[in-house]
Image: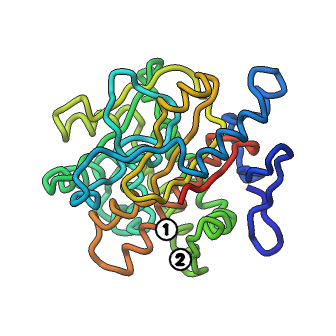
């Protein structure tokens, strides 16, 4: 996401001047190459981005309004779909694993002292969440191997956490454009936590982490199997409480060549409040969760990925 000297987003795409992820991004998932190959259209990418910024591709999650605060990240930001799972639920990188990493970045010293890995840590967290009535989840995909689960946020968690350690200042600039201002002290704490986690081999394998969801829930429906290739062209940052991206609607209107990542920020905040009661630590872990989601996008996606906010 390119920024001016004041840190604001630079509207630098030519068609409708939709913000892009920009030079922080080092991944391969982006529209540019497919546009150049004639597979998709820049104009259509920007139309989808515009619609998402207006909330047109979002839908309300079917729950009683009184329990919206119980909705925490279950499914991933991944733009692909599982045709066998029609349940809509909030999105964040790695599904409920966004909460695990958010806590780990802040509580790194404690977790390292206890010898915890991401599987051992998440097992405790997921058991607590499920016993308190929260719904957890994650995903694999239809071409996962024994070494990889098919969720980039889990399979590449160590790389993403290392990216946070290396790029914490740049990530904080992006978070500020999304309305999440971060103090230098907290940036330093998150950076140090990331370094400590990597040094002490906190991250388990993707398949181990996904199996952990199945083991805790004793229900395989808590793990989606998404299908096909990554065709994401937009990252949606959704702040509208009780809603999430309707991937089927995007496919119906634009076809399978256009997909979107989606982060339900409101549900990430719910999830942090579900795992932490101290107000100061809630803020720190929420920021850490936002950092993890920005870093995941930067590691997986390329510079031309559009970024829009639905508020």
Q: Nearer the viewer, residue 1 or 243?
A: 243
Question: Is 59 above or below relative to 169?
Answer: above
Q: Residue furthest left?
A: 131
The figure's colour scheme reads: rainbow
**Residue linked to disc 2:** 186
Query: Could you say where residue 82 lies in the image, as x and y percent from the top left?
Result: 40, 25
Answer with left or right where residue 300 lies relative to residue 38.
left
Are circles 1 and 2 on residues that touch, CB within 8 Å? yes
> Tag on residue 84?
none
Q: Secondary structure at mark 1?
A: helix
Q: Judge the density around disc 2: few (<14), some (14-19), many (≥20) Cα neighbours within 10 Å.
A: some
**Residue linked to disc 1:** 287
Q: Nearer the viewer, residue 56 or 172?
A: 56
Q: Earlier in the sequence, mark 1 or mark 2?
A: 2
Q: Secondary structure at mark 2?
A: helix
Q: Nearer the viewer, mark 1 or mark 2?
A: 1
Q: Quadrant of residue 270?
A: bottom left
- Residue shown at 73% from the left, 50% from the top: 20
Query: Could you say where residue 87 lies in the image, as x and y percent from the top left?
Result: 31, 34
- Residue shown at 66% from the left, 50% from the top: 307
Answer with left or right where residue 285 lies relative to residue 36.
left
Question: Is 76 above or below relative to 70?
Answer: above
Query: Could you say where residue 233 lies in the image, as x and y percent from the top left?
Result: 66, 37
- Quarter of the picture containing the N terminus is bottom right
- Residue shown at 33% from the left, 59% from the top: 271
**CA–CA distance in space, label 1 to label 2:** 9 Å
Q: Judge the density around disc 1: few (<14), some (14-19), many (≥20) Cα neighbours within 10 Å.
A: many
């Amino acid at each position: 996401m390119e920024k001016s000297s004041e840190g604001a987003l630079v509207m630098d795409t030519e068609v409708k001047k939709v913000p892009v992820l920009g030079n922080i991004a080092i991944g391969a998932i982006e529209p540019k190459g497919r546009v150049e190959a004639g597979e998709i259209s820049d104009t259509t990418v920007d139309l989808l981005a515009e619609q998402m910024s207006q909330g047109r591709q979002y839908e309300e999650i079917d729950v009683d309004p009184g329990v919206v605060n119980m909705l925490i990240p279950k499914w991933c930001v991944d733009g692909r779909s599982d045709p066998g799972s029609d349940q809509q639920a909030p999105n964040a990188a790695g599904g409920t694993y966004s909460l695990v990493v958010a806590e780990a970045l802040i509580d790194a010293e404690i977790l390292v002292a206890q010898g915890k890995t991401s599987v051992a840590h998440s097992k405790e967290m997921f058991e607590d969440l499920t016993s308190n009535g929260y719904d957890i989840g994650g995903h694999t995909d239809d071409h996962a191997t024994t070494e990889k689960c098919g969720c980039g946020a889990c399979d590449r968690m160590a790389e993403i956490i290392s990216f946070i350690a290396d790029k914490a200042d740049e990530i904080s600039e992006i978070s500020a454009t999304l309305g999440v201002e971060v103090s230098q002290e907290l940036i330093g704490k998150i950076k140090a936590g990331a370094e400590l986690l990597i040094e002490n081999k906190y991250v388990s394998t993707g398949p181990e982490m996904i199996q952990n969801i199945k083991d805790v829930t004793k229900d395989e429906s808590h793990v989606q199997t998404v299908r096909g290739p990554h065709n994401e062209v937009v990252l949606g940052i959704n702040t509208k409480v009780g809603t999430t991206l309707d991937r089927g609607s995007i496919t119906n209107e634009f076809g399978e060549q256009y997909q979107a990542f989606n982060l339900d920020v409101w549900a990430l905040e719910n999830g942090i409040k579900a795992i932490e009661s101290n107000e100061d630590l809630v803020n720190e872990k929420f920021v850490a969760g936002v950092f993890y989601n920005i870093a995941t996008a930067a590691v997986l996606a390329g510079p031309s990925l559009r970024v829009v906010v639905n508020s």
